[in-house]
Amino acid sequence: MKVLVLNSGSSSIKYQLFRDQDWVAIASGLVARIGEAEGEIKLNWLDDQGASHSSQESLPIPTHQAGIDRIIRSLRESGVLTDVAELAAIGHRVVHGGARFKHPAIVDDSVVAAIREVIPLAPLHNPGHLAGIEVARALFPSVPSVVVFDTAFHQTMPPTAYRYAIPESFYSEHRIRRYGFHGTSHHYVAKRAAAMLGKPLDQCNLITLHLGNGASATAIRAGQCIDTSMGLTPLEGLVMGTRSGDIDPAVLIYLCKHLGFDADALDRLFNRQSGLVGLCGVNDMREIDQLAAAGDERAELAIGLTTHRLKKYIGAYYAELGRVDAIVFTGGIGENSAEIRRRACEGLERLGITLDAEANDSRASRGERRISSASGEVKVLVIPTNEELEIAQQSRLAVMG
Ligand code: ADP
């Protein structure tokens, strides 16, 4: 059987098709600019001999329904899917599941209603996901749709980690609390870390650092999340590509009182114009590394703030956990930037965290690897994330009951 994973956004749908006997992704692609005059369709696939192919087209894709129709047609034409009956499940990525979903769920009307209900908490994401889910259900009623939530892994946090210290009614009446995101990635790398450590996940204490354009840190005790750096929304925590991360809320009050900011202007400032881009004008860490190496002071400060904040979270989560088996770096920056990893771990030798400089710097190494020195008590691991694979496997598991 096969599992199709869909990540439906407001104007694009990314997808991957997995073969469930060996979990190889036999196709992946994208339908973008839905609703615009000219849409974009991209597909990569493997043929029976394992050779890779790709195709690209431009044509109008008026709706999500047309987009998903088109995806299935492309998969059929390339020969990777003969019939939708080959699909054991369609797995959907959903950013926000509120406090209800601790696990993946097979989609029914009540699940759709629950995702709709938390739209105010994820206005940019949940509507696009819902469009994909509803179209998949309508087009392929015989294939179960499964939703896998970015928030689910963090539902094991205790109230001391998920509540804000504000009056209770904001929590009880308005659900204002910390939810956490990137859960699918944190869970995936935690499982891989346990395999690398040779221990069951439920015996592992881990700090996982997902550092991409969005970035978050998670403290995992005995395989379960006990704290994470993102909050009500993905804005809290680490310094990110365009988001500020942690900030004194009084800054917002000041901006409103003295600089005429309203809610939309605050949203733009802290979600789109801050973080790395706000500090040095660029949000691509490769470019920032080069600028800093050439002596650009703003780029150097951006790296400094990023690694200073990372180190604070490592320290805080170490204190929460008491004992740490491994620190895991993942995401585009975590997997690729030796400099960020080096500076985040620098000076932590007394905590048992010591990098092997050569292993950390090696550009030849790819894939899962240990970068801590043999003497370091805490293993430091680089583990490429694979959220789509995690969604595919969790979806398969959910429909197997
Ligand atoms: P997203 O959150 O969009 O999925 P990714 O996980 O792909 O993001 O990470 C994007 C980030 O990874 C960008 O800041 C990019 O500069 C960074 N990145 C990718 N490759 C490298 C590299 N070789 N060195 C440093 N940073 C890198």
Image (tube, rainbow, N blue to C red):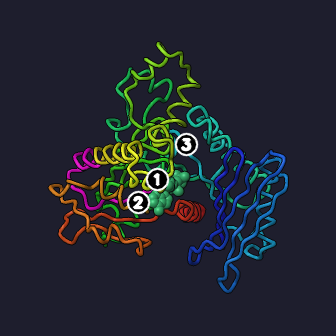
Element type where label 1 sits in the image: helix
- Mark before the other along the chain sequence, 3 or 1: 3
Q: Nearer the viewer, residue 285 or 52?
A: 285
Looking at the rendering, the stretch of residues picked out in magenta corresponds to 314-334
| 268 left or right, relative to 84 | left
Q: Nearer the viewer, residue 230 or 2?
A: 230
The residue that appears at 41% across and 23% down in the rendered structure is 251
Is 284 placed above or below 16 here?
above
Q: Which residue is mark 1?
A: 285
Element type where label 3 sits in the image: loop
Say the numbered circle drawn on residue 96: 3
Label 2 CB less than 8 angstroms from ligand 1: yes
The residue mark sitting in front, 3 or 1, is: 1
The residue that appears at 26% across and 44% down in the rendered structure is 316
Q: Does residue 295 show up magenta in the picture? A: no
Label 1 CB less than 8 angstroms from ligand 1: yes
Q: Crowding at label 3, few (<14), some or many (≥20) Cα neighbours within 10 Å?
A: many
The residue furthest front is 294
Is 366 placed above or below 260 here?
below
- Type of amino acid at the residue the image marks with label 1: Met
- Report the Cα–Cα distance between label 3 and label 1: 27 Å
Quarter occupied by the N terminus = bottom right
- Mark before the other along the chain sequence, 3 or 2: 3
| 137 left or right, relative to 384 | right
- Report the Cα–Cα distance between label 3 and label 2: 29 Å
Element type where label 2 sits in the image: loop
Q: Which residue is mark 2?
A: 337
The residue that appears at 82% across and 58% down in the rendered structure is 58
